[in-house]
Image: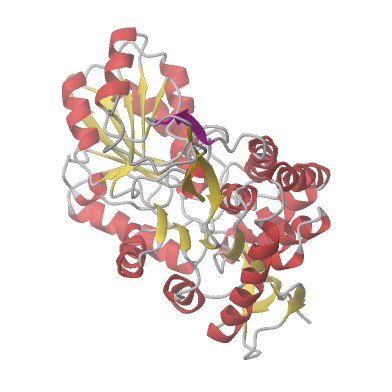
Amino acid sequence: MAERFRNYIAGEWTDSASGRTFENRNPADHDDLIGEFPRSDEQDLSRAVESAKRGFEQWRRTPAPLRGDVLRRVGDLLTERKEEISRAMTREMGKVLNETRGDVQEGIDTAYYAAVEGRRLFGHTVPSELRDKWAMSYRRPIGVAGLITPFNFPLAIPTWKMFPALVCGNSVILKPAEDVPHTSTILVEVLIEAGLPPDVVQLVHGFGEEIGAAMVEHPEIPVISFTGSTAVGSQIGSVCGRMHKRLSLEMGGKNAQIVMPDAAMDLAIEGVLWGAFGTTGQRCTATSRLLLHDDIHDEFLDQLVDRASRLTLGSGLVDGNDVGPLINQASLDKVESYVEVAISEGDEIVTGGKRATGGALDRGYFFQPTILRGVKPGSRLACEEVFGPVLSVIRFSDLEHAFRINNEVKYGLSSSLYTTDVRASFRAMQDLDNGITYINAPTIGAEAHMPFGGVKQTGNGHREGGWEVYEFYSETKVCYVDYSGKLQRAQIDTYDI
C-alpha cells in the first residue's frame, strides 16, 4: 500500500478537504511509487490563508535577529540530514546524487545567509531639511507570501523564496511542483523542528491550474513569487497586476556558451557538457546554445560529440551514472518533438536524438544527450526553450557576431564566454544582454549570496538570492519625528532663514 502524505495547514498534517490525492513516482522507474499526496483545492487554501494570517501577526512582532536564529537552526538540521534528503530528492526528481547534494547544500547556504540578514535589514537615517526634526526609514514585512516552485531544484528554490520571506517577518504558503512534493514535505518538517511557529508556514500540495491559480487569485495573499515557464508567468502577471499584488517572476532561458579561438578548449568542453547535460538540461540556466567561432568549430565539435556520446544514463541513485531521466512523460514527449522540429528545419543530429531504451531505461523517462549542428540563428531551436538534454550548435565569425546571436532571443538569463582575452571578457560582461554572465565557466553555477535572475522575458526585474531579494519581501516605511514643538511645513518653511 502506498504511503500517504499530507498538507501542513494550521499546525497539523492533514488530508485535502475533498480527500482527492495524486501519485508521486520515481521518473527513473515509474513502477516505483513514492507515495500519494493531497490534491488540494480552494477549501484547503482558505484554511491555509486563515492560519497564515494568524502566523503573520505573531511572526512580524518577533525581532528579526530571533527570526534569523530559527533559520540558523534550519541550516544545522539540513546539514545533519543532507544525505537522507539528497537521496529522497534523487528518487523523486531524478538528477544524480552529486547534484541533489548540491541542491541541499544551496538550501543550507541560503539558511545561514538568511540567519545573518536577520541582523542586517537596514533602513536609512538621513538629515531632515527642517530644524529639530528626524527623518528615517526601515523595512517592514508585507503579509502572507504565496510561493509557487518548480520541480528542478526541489529544495534550493523553495529555500530561495521561503527563507528571505521568513526573515523579513512574513508568513508563507508553499505550493511545490506536483512532481516533487516529498522534498517540500521534508523541508517543512525541518522548519517546524527548528522552532518556526506552526501558523507561520503552510504546505499545500496540488496542481498548478488548481491550487496554484487559486493562490494567485486569493485577495489575502499580497505577495506572489513564481518560478516556471514564461507562458504561465505572463498569466500570473496579468492577475497580480489587476489585483495590485507584489510579484516576482523567474522564468525561461535560452542560454549561450560562446567559445573563442584563444579559449582553453578542454575547459570549454567540460563547461558545455556540464551546462548542457547536467540536470538532464532541466535548468533555466542550462546551456541550450553553443556558439563556436569558425576557426575552431569542427575540431571542438568533434571532441564534444565524442565526450557526450560516452555519458552514462541511468538512475541518479547509481554511482557512475552521469545523466538521469527527464521529469515526466510530457517532458519526454516535448524533447522528442523539438528534435523533430530540428530535423524539419534542416539541422543535423551529430549525437543522440532519441529516447534512451534498453533494460532499466525502459522504466524511466530517459532521452539521449543530443547535439545538433548547423542550427541557424532565428530558428526555433535557436530561440525556444527546450528544457531537456538538447544542445544547438551555431557558428559565428567574430565577437560582435556572437553577441548579436546571444542577444536575439526573447530570454535574457545567463551567458558564458570562454576566452583568455581580458578585453573580450569585459566587453562580454557589458554587452551580453543577460542577468548573469560567466567568464571561463558554464552558464550554470549561481551562488546563494548573489542575486539571481534575468532580463527581457526571463523575469520582471526582481531577483532571487543575495541581498536584493530581501527588498522584495519587505516594504519601506518612512518615519518623521518633529520635536521642535511647533508646526513646520516642509518645502514651505524650509528656506525661511
For the residue pair 178 and 346, the one nearer the viewer reads as 178
Q: Main secondary structure of the magenta part?
A: strand
Left or right of 230: which side holds 109?
right
Give percent across and percent down for residue 88.
Answer: 72, 57
Whether residue 4 is visible to the viewer of this picture, yes or no, is no
Give percent across and percent down for residue 112.
Answer: 70, 37
Residue 375 location, quadrant: top left
Q: Residue at x 60, y 53 (%)?
A: 162
Question: What's the coloring here?
Answer: secondary structure
**Residue 114 vertical position relative to residue 195 in the rendered view, above or below:** above
For the residue pair 327 and 309, the one nearer the viewer reads as 327
Q: Which residues are magenta?
A: 123-128
Residue that sits furthest to the front in the current view: 486
Residue 339 location, quadrant: bottom left
Give percent across and percent down for residue 473.
Answer: 51, 50
Give percent across and percent down for residue 21.
Answer: 63, 83
Left or right of 443: which side holds 324?
right
